[in-house]
Image (spheres, rainbow, N blue to C red):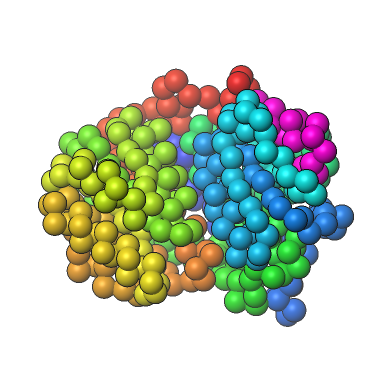
Amino acid sequence: GKSGYDHYMLKEIHEQPTALRQGLSGRLDELSGEVTVDELDTVATPETIHFVACGTSYHAALYGVELFREAGVPAQAFLASEYATGPAPVPENGLVVGVTQSGETADTLSALREAQGRGAVTLALTNVVGSTAARECDHALYIRSGPEIGVAATKTFSSQLTALNLLAETVTDGATGSRDLVAALRDIPGDIQQVLDETTAEEIVDEYRDNESFFFIGRGLHFPVALEGALKFKEITYEHAEGFAAGELKHGPLALVTRNTPVFAIVTGDGERARKTIGNVKEVEARDAPVVAVTDGQSDVERYADHVLEIPETHPRTAPMLANVQLQLVAYHMADRLGRSIDKPRNLAKSVTVE
Ligand code: M6R
């Protein structure tokens, strides 16, 4: 059942600390700062890596790409539906990772079969033990999120990001992270709990309930979260929402920005990327757009924001997970205000088994 929550989606948002603890259990060695994942013992360091996925899982894949690139392994993410129908650019001596919560998504299975047919080593990053992807791939890495009933993927996305860190650490021999990352992963369930306990997402949505178009912007690892924030929002509120790389606004989308288009901007840290995103925030503010900053308070973005959704300070790898939880809550509470069918949005299915 829903354990007292109004919807499975809200229950599953609140299950994230537990889901991530399960996903990390026995896989982090805090003393040595090492990551050990038994399932990955026999996976060699690939020369290149491709991710294939759909929807939310594709956003997780975009995040995964960055982790491998940081470790010096060329990586690309593909929409599974495109990978399978075009001349698939399967890499030689490469690893093809299907990111699929259900392990049953037809487009992702086709892409993996195509890759396998061309001689690539395949790995399923999935939540479901014994799923088709898990059975057909050479390797499987389980995200251990527990069952997700709501059509909108929430806890499984967070579990995917966590597992992608484990994959990158293990397969690149710890070249991507450090003891700091292991410590941040250990703390992430508690940090998410803090966001859940202290969020003000429910309070801010009322002000925007009459708006019909919403934008989400972020840079670097926050770009996939901007895309995911917009997908979740459109999927359950039925309002128009789009995510952009913050720097792309001025290349077209800025034409849509008015006082009627709230912009959610993810800004953490106080580095180059934060400064540049704040520059983009100023551009939308100058067009009178309402700004909601999702931030850890390390920069002065709050000065340009109408509302702030705060997240605790953490490692740059884990900050996107915290920002995402705030955006999940924004989508949920807005959909709830609008009386939408949150757990079963119109036209959508939990598992898409047709191409
Ligand atoms: O089971 P999968 O991860 O392969 O599903 C892929 C997408 O259909 C899925 O992530 C979808 O975008 C989400 N349910 C949207 O919230």
- Is 61 left, or right, of 136 in this rendering? left
Left or right placement of residue 173 versus residue 266 in this view? right
Task: State the image coordinates of residue 31 (x, y, percent, origin top left).
Answer: 73, 80
Q: Which residue is rendered at x = 20% and y = 42% of the image?
A: 255
Q: Is residue 78 visible?
A: yes
Asked which quadrant contains residue 46, the reply is bottom right
x 42%, y 27%: residue: 345
- Which percent across, then down, holds residue 288? 12, 52
- Of the 4 image quadrants, the one containing the C terminus is top right
What is the quadrant of residue 334 in the picture?
Answer: top left
Give whichever of 258, 347 is nearer the camera: 258
Residue 105 vertical position relative to residue 196 in the rendered view, above or below: above
Picture coordinates of residue 189, whole percent (x, y): 55, 62
Q: How many marks?
A: 0
Q: Quadrant of residue 44?
A: bottom right
Residue 193 visible:
no
- x 61%, y 60%: residue: 69
317 w.r.t. 244: above or below? below
Residue 243 falls inside the magenta stretch:
no
The residue closer to the viewer here, 145 or 100, is 100
Is residue 101 or residue 121 the one in the foreground? 121
Q: Is residue 202 above or below residue 295?
A: above
| Image quadrant where one finds the N terminus | top right
In the image, residue 111 lies in the stretch drawn in magenta: yes
Residue 349 image position (x, y, % from top left): 53, 24
- Residue depicted at x 79% and y 41%: 120
Task: Tell me the magenta residue range.
Answer: 106-128
Q: Point out the residue furthest to the bottom here.
A: 31
